[in-house]
Every structure is written in structure tokens, then in C-alpha cells.
Amino acid sequence: MTGWTFIACPTGSNAECRTDLRVTQSSRIFHDRDAVVCFESTGGHEWQLWETLKAESVIARQVQPAQVKASARSRGTRAKTDRIDAELIASLFAFRPDAGRRLPTRKLRLHKAFTSKRAKIVEMRKRLLAQIRAHQKLGTAWMFDSVDTDLKARLDCLIRKLENRIRAAICSDDLLAETAGLLRFLHSIGRVASTMLIAEMPELGTITGGQAAALVGLAPVAHDSGTLRGKRDIAAGRRALRHVISQAALVASHHNPSMKAFADRLRTRETAQGHHNGGRSETGQSG
């Protein structure tokens, strides 16, 4: 298998770029070296490389393409080739040796595959329901009623089957079952939210609340300049998990007394900050 773009970051020396190596070739080259093999996520094609490197006791890290793109922008790099990508990954890991993620366990990878497939089918069902509502407004629902009904029933059946497999996968592993139980103990964290947290955030238990919020993409990003305190926005992060957690937080802000009080304090503070800005726009220009 060829076409891999990755780099080795020997401890205490300059990063080294290697491209277009076979999996067996890469493990042989780096097995006896104090190196970390780093690569981008490529839609699942990197798993074979990752598994082989782990089997050969070679340390490997996966970095998200968004991080590499941000590094390229910071360096003013606009061109894109395998060699350039390798150099960008090398510079990123030389600057941040703790970046990237380790290979998840096999059970956790299977669990994530189930939850990802479920999320995609749920999204398909959402689009179908939106189309059904549009047909009803146009008065053309009768033209597609049987097709839409059959398709919705099929999607519902697939979602139930996947949920059963997800439940069975969690119950078959003591650690996953314990984690799911702890998460479900929290108010507003239900079955879907707990399974998504397990699948999309394996770092749980090793990071702070602020770090978790940043990984999900729910940490407010400041937009301040001088005396202007701009509106905080959220962005990036793990999209599938962010959507689920946002829904759970919305429910909690209405039905969980402590969370409702916390949400009210945030709204009050945001309103007060808006008045403090004196009607000026968020870009710092007078309104």
C-alpha cells in the first residue's frame, strides 16, 4: 500500500519528512528509532497504517486536517503537495509534541462506527421529514405519501437496529458500561448523548471541563479589542458531538434547576455586557 504522507519527529532533533512509503516499509524504518510517526486523518484509510505501526511498537499520532490547514495559514503556505503536507505536519508536531491522538481501542472504534452510522441515518430522516413538511405546504403530499411512509419506516427500523447494536457493544465492555452509567447519572444526559460522548470524546476523565468544551466546539471564543468586549461565538470542534450536547444543554437549561439558574446568569451577564458596549457594533465601529 503506497501513498501515505507522514513524518517522523525524533525527540530532540529536527523533524524528518517521509512520503509514499509502504506500511511494512515504514514500520521497519522507524521501529528502532526514537520517533513518532504522524499523519493526517484520511477518511478511515489511515487505520491500516495505524494498526501496523502499533503492532510494531512504533509510536503514532493522528492529526486533524484542520490543524494542518491552520498551520499552513500561519506560515503563509498556499501550495499543496504531499511533500508540503508532510513538512507542515512535521513542523506542527515539532512545535506541539503533545498534539494528535493515539489509536483508540478496537471496541471503541467499533462503537464509534455504530454511532457515526446512526448519526448519518438520523440526518437522512431529518431531511426526509423536512421534505414531507414541504410537500404538505405545497399540497402535493398525496403524490409521495406511500414512498415517504415506506422510507421513513425503513429509516426508523435501521436506527433501532443500530441502537440495539450500540447498547450491546457498551454492555459487553465493563469500562464502557461504567462510563455510560456515570454519564447517564447526570441530568439531561440520555442514552444518545452518553453513547456519543463515549464515541467522540475518549479523552473524558483526563481533561478539564474547559478543555472538553473546546474540543466539542462549545467554548466561547473572545472577540475583544481595546475597551470593546465583543460577542462570544462558538466554532469548529467535533460537529456531531456538538449538536447532541447542544440539545442536551438546551433541555437542561429549561428543566434542570441548577442548569437553568446557570443559564439565566449567563443571559443576564451577556445583556449587561451589551449595554456596557453602548450600542457599538461587534467590530468596534460605532452604530
Image (cartoon, rainbow, N blue to C red):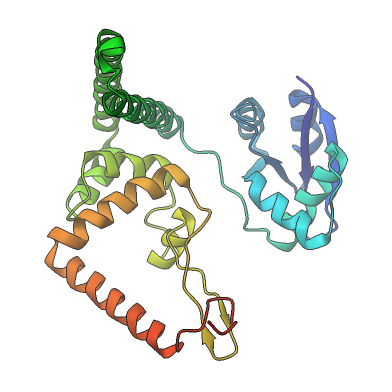
Residue nearest the observer in this picture, 159 or 138: 138
Please name the residue shown 41% across and 90% down the image: 276
Q: Residue 72 is drawn in which quadrant?
A: bottom right
Task: Give the image quarter of residue 77.
Answer: bottom right
Q: Give residue 244's position: percent from left, percent from top.
A: 33, 46
Q: Considering depth in this image, is 49 or 41 the residue closer to the camera? A: 41
Left or right: residue 231 versus residue 251 is right
Q: Is residue 233 visible?
A: yes
Instruction: Spot the residue most to the front.
Output: 139
Q: What residue lies at 40% left-to-right and 46% top-to-bottom?
A: 241
- Return the x and y of residue 32 as percentages of the image width and height: 77, 40
Q: Is residue 173 left or right of residue 105?
A: left
Seen from the viewer's position, the closer of residues 277 and 3 is 277
Residue 11 appears in view? no
Quadrant of the rendered structure where residue 195 is?
top left
Tell me residue 228's x, y (percent): 54, 86
In this rendering, is residue 37 above or below 98?
A: above
* 196 relative to 254, above or below: above
- Residue 218 higher or lower than 62, as above or below: below
Is 253 displayed left or right of 227 in the figure? left
Quadrant housing the N terminus: top right
Q: Position of residue 82 (x, y in %)?
A: 83, 37
Number of marks in the image? 0
